[in-house]
Amino acid sequence: MRFVWQFLAAMAMYAAGGNIVTAVRENDWLTLALGLAAAAGAVLGYAWVVRRTEHRAVTEVAREGAVARTGWGVLLGAGWFGAVMVNLFASGYYDVHGLGSARGAIGLLGFMAAAATMEEIVYRGVLFRVVEEHIGTYLALALSGLVFGLSHLLNEHATLWGGIAIAVEAGFMLAAAYAATRSLWVTIGVHFGWNFAAAGVFSTEVSGNGGNLGLLDATLSGPEPLTGGDFGPEGSVYSVGFGVLLTLVFLWLAHRRGNVVAPGARRAARAGSPLTLPR
C-alpha cells in the first residue's frame, strides 16, 4: 500500500504542478517562478509522504549535499546533450543562425525544472525505488525505463522509435544513476540539464513536444536516424549511444559501491538475512 499512496501522491503533484506551469507558459517570468516553486513543492511533498509511509529519513532528497549533487547532475546532463549536438553540428545537420531569445530561455528554465523534478519523483523516486526492493535492480531498471519511454508516446510528435529511444537513453540511464548514487538530486540534475540544454540553449524539440526558442536561433535537419526527425534529437542514434554508455558507467559504479539489489532482497531482510537495501 505504501507504493500505492506514494504513487498517487506523486501523480497528483505531477498533474497539479504541470497544469499550473503550463497555464502560464506565455509569461516567461511567471513560468520561471511557478516552475521553481512547483519543483520545490514536489520535493517537499515527496519527502513528507515517504516519511509518513516508510517511517525513515528520506536520504535520497537530504538537504546535505543537495546543491553539489544537483549541480554535478546538471553539468553531466548538459554535457551529454552538448556532445550530441556537437556531433550533429559537425555532420552539418545543425545550423546556427544567430542568437535566439533570452526571455524564452528564462521561461524554459522554470518549465524544465518542474518537469524534471516531478518526473524523477514519479519514475525514480517511487516506481524504480519501490519496485527494485522486490524484483532487484536490473528488472526494476528495465520495467521503469520501459514505462518511462511508453509515457512519452502521448506527446504531440511522438513516434514508436522515439519512445524506445527515451526508454533506453533516459529511462535506463536515470535508473542506473539513481542505483549508483541513491540520490534523487543527481537524477533531477541530469534530467534538467539535458532538457534545458535541448530547449533553452540549442532550441530543439524535446521528446516530440513541439519547437522551442532558447538562446540560439538554429535549425535541425537531416536524416531522421541521426537528427531524430519530428521527435527531436532524443530520437537520434547519437543520443541512444551516449545514453547506453552512461548507463553502463553508472551500473559499474553501482556494482563497485555495492548498491545493486538482488531480487527478493527486501523479503530476505525481513526474514532476518543480513542483506540490507542501500539508501
Image (cartoon, rainbow, N blue to C red):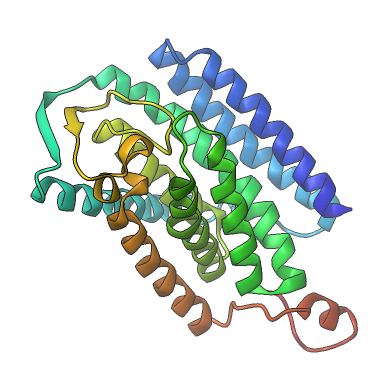
Residue depicted at 19% across the width and 41% down the height = 222
Residue depicted at 32% across the width and 62% down the height = 242
Where is residue 118 shown, x and y percent of the image?
Answer: 59, 39
User: Is 139 on the left-hand or right-hand side of 169?
Assistant: right
Where is residue 56 shown, x and y percent of the image?
Answer: 78, 60
Determine if residue 36 is in view: yes
Q: Nearer the viewer, residue 223 or 216?
A: 223
Query: Image quadrant of residue 277?
Result: bottom right
Residue depicted at 62% across the width and 41% down the height = 43
Q: Is residue 164 above or below residue 23?
A: below
Q: Nearer the viewer, residue 153 or 128?
A: 153
Residue depicted at 46% across the width and 14% down the height = 30
Q: Is residue 266 above or below residue 182?
A: below
User: Is 170 on the left-hand or right-hand side of 63?
Assistant: left
In the picture, the quarter occupied by the C terminus is bottom right
Where is residue 183 shown, x and y percent of the image?
Answer: 55, 59
Where is residue 64 shown, x and y percent of the image?
Answer: 54, 55
User: Is 132 on the left-hand or right-hand side of 177?
Assistant: right
Query: Image quadrant of residue 18?
Result: top right
